[in-house]
Each structure stands twice: as C-alpha cells, then as structure tokens.
Amino acid sequence: MSRRRDSTSYQWSARGFIAPGVILVAVLLYAPLLWTTYLSFTEYNGLGDPDWVGLANYGAMFADPEFFGSLGNTLLWVAGTLIVPVGLGLGLALLTFDLKGGIWLRLPFLIPYAISGIGVGLIWSFILQSDGALDQALALVGVVDPPRWLLDAPLNTVVMILASSWQGVGVNALLFTIGLQSIPKEPLEAARLDGARGARLFGSILWPMLRPLTAVVIGLSIVASLKTFDIVQGMTKGGPGRASETLALTMYKDTFVNSDYGLGSAIAVFLTIVTLVASVLYLRQQLSKKNEI
C-alpha cells in the first residue's frame, strides 16, 4: 500500500515538472495552429473581425494556376535537396572520414552553414544576376550569351537549389561522418580482409549501418525543403512574376503583402498537411524496413 502511494506521489511530481513544458508547447505551437486553421475558413484582412466563408479560400487556392506552379517548384526543391546536398554530403563524408586531417577538408563546407538563408541568397544573387560575377567570368573565356540564371524558369529554381546546397552540404557531411565514426571497426576490418573495397564495402557494410542516420538526414531535408522561403526571397522574391515561388513564399505574399489572411492561412494549412503526410509516410517506410531487419 505504501509502495503504491509512493508511486502515485512520484507520478504527480513528474506531471508537475512536465506541465510547464506542455503548457508552453500548447500556447506557442498548437494555439497558433488552431487560429490559423480557423482563419483559413474566413475572409480577414487583419482589421476588424474575420467573416466566416467556409471552404471558399480552399476553392480559390485550388482554382489558382499560380498555386500549382508554386506546388511544382516546392516539389522540385524536395527532389533537388535530396539529390544534391544529401548526396554530396554523403560523398564528402565517405571520402574524408578515414583520412588523417579529414576535418580540415570538411571545415570549408561547414562555414556557409553559419550564414543565414537570406545572406546566402544575397551572395548568390551577386554571382548569378544578369552581368553578375558568373557572367563576367564566362565572358573572360569567350561565353558572350550566358543563360539568364535567375530570369528563366525552371532554371532559376535549379540554380537556387544549388545555392542552397552550397550551404547544406557541410552539415550533412558532418552528420554522415558522425555516423561513419560510430560504426564498429571490427566488421569493417573483417570485410577489408575478405577483399571488400569501394562500392562493395559501401553497399554491404557502410550503407546498412548508416541507414538509421540516413533516415534522419533525409527526413530533415524533406521537411526543410517543403518550407523553403528565405533563399528564394533573397534571390528572386519569387519572380520574375511568380515563376519561382514556393508554397511558403506564396503563403507569405498572400498573407502579409496582399493582406488576404484567409487565403494565406489556407495555403499554410495545406502546406502543414503535406509536410505531415510526407513525414509520416517516410518514417513509416523506414520503420517497416527496420522491422524487416
């Protein structure tokens, strides 16, 4: 009886310690989410009271062809950020983790991560704008009619993905290096004694042991790419026209530039659902693979 009373007392003490954190999360995360969801069913310009309009904002969102352009650009960002920064980060980690002084080879790739997304956008705008640094460098080697890097779609989205990769390769390489260094040396040495080298060593030993960390890196990349905003805002502001907008930038413009809080909230809710569905499907697939192992 005494043990049960002690257990109950411990549980109430634990709940008391957890309660402030739960309340803080509820206030800062769930309350804005509920308010945004409510606004998505209203017409509201930031002044006065919202007017209930039902699903009208969602109808307007799906009827707008520019919305599907933003959705296409966002999906291009998801594919690009999975292929370029994650792939290059893995390659850089594989090439340097076993080298003496490899940290000094990875360090230059980590420095851009300390720069904000807007800062990265401004740096690459200077390089890629018409008659910018890249065009002038190409002119020196005889290229007089270079592509319009930031003006033609989808080229502008592709070069922005490359600019974003410049920032993201280093941190992905760091995460993969941590994963490689955590692999026990015994199976690696045994595989090397059996003659495993290069692709065979990677496919048979390194990749299976890196799978849990790879799931985390890819999951974080998917979520971050779905919310891409700062680099696009810094480089093209979604232009020319709305050709390079992502869903996050469309949401921002509708809400804070056009003062259409209802439509902006509808896009925010749609983006939240897409992010949740993508995260759940990906994690579910990874967990099923883990159970198979």
Image (cartoon, grey):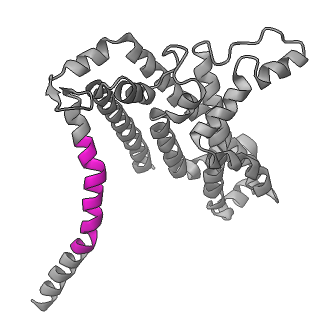
Answer with left or right where residue 92 lies relative to residue 252.
Answer: right
x and y, in percent, of residue 277 in the image: 34, 35
x and y, in percent, of residue 126 in the image: 71, 28
Q: In this view, does 13 lie above or below 203?
A: below
Q: In this view, does 1 lie above or below 210?
A: below
Is residue 80 within the magenta segment?
no
Residue 190 visible to the viewer: yes
Find residue 255 and report its image quarter. top left
Is residue 16 within the magenta segment?
yes
Answer with left or right where residue 217 lies relative to residue 137.
Answer: left
Q: Which range of residues does the magenta coloring cover?
A: 15-34
In the displayed image of the protein, which residue is found farthest to the front? Answer: 47
In the displayed image of the protein, which residue is found farthest to the left? Answer: 1
Residue lying at 30% horizontally and 52% vertically, measured from the top left: 28
In the displayed image of the protein, which residue is found farthest to the bottom? Answer: 2
Residue 194 visible to the viewer: no
